[in-house]
Amino acid sequence: MLTTTRDRILEEAARLFTEKGYEATSVQDIAQALGLSKAALYHHFGSKEEILYEISLLALKGLVAAGEEALKIPDPKEALLRFMEGHARYFEENYPFFVTMLQEIKSLSPENRLKTIALRDRHEANLRAILRRGVEKGVFREVDVAGGAGGALHAQLDDPLVPARGAMRAEEVARGYYDLILRGLERGSA
């Protein structure tokens, strides 16, 4: 749980950016929502873009960590399931951070956008490594790991409707996706 003033700023900014958009949210809006002065907010962050960048990094660093844990699992099927569950769980627990990163990456400076994209690419590379391992071990059929299969899987995992699925938790949704995807990946399923 976020507890420091800096953390509270990030949490509130992510909520406001998700609701109103980055461009429509001012530093004053963020400060006011927290009961802070703009000067107090600027004590923690030098600019609104710095807040956005930090939100983006936090969203992606957690994903990368979850993906790297899954990558350590030798069995490709189990690794894929853990990757998907970890991604979905992190998405659900950090929804405003995720949505902000996905929707507002275009608002980052070119340098910060490149750093953010590098983290996103690292997460996607972990997924491709799991899929590639499954193909190499003969567990998964030959698929386009770099594009088709990896891209389709990420599109499902980043589905912004995950938190709106009623009583289903994100991990349950991920397991449902896993069952569908595994049937298409397993050898003999084509």
Image (tube, helix red, strand yellow):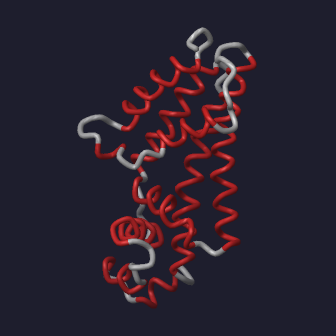
Query: Which residue is depicted at the point 38% across and 38% down?
Result: 170
Query: Which residue is depicted at the point 50% across and 40% down?
Result: 87
The residue positioned farthest toward the top in the image shown: 188
The residue positioned farthest toward the front in the image shown: 190
Locate residue 171: give its quadrant.
top left
Query: Does 29 sit above or below residue 8?
Result: below
Query: Does 10 sit above or below residue 118?
Result: below
Q: Nearer the viewer, residue 189 or 6?
A: 189
Image x and y of residue 138, in percent: 70, 13
Locate residue 189: give its quadrant.
top right
Query: Does 169 sit above or below residue 175?
Result: below
Query: Does 116 sit above or below residue 75?
Result: below
Image x and y of residue 63, in percent: 56, 46
Q: Quadrant of the N terminus?
A: bottom left
Q: Is residue 42 left or right of residue 143?
A: left
Q: Quadrant of the C terminus?
A: top right
Query: Which residue is depicted at the point 39% across and 79% down?
Result: 24
Image x and y of residue 120, in percent: 63, 52
The residue positioned farthest toward the left in the image shown: 166
Query: Which residue is depicted at the point 40% across and 59% down?
Result: 96
Q: Is residue 133 left or right of residue 190?
A: right
Image x and y of residue 162, in percent: 36, 43
Numbered-mark total: 0
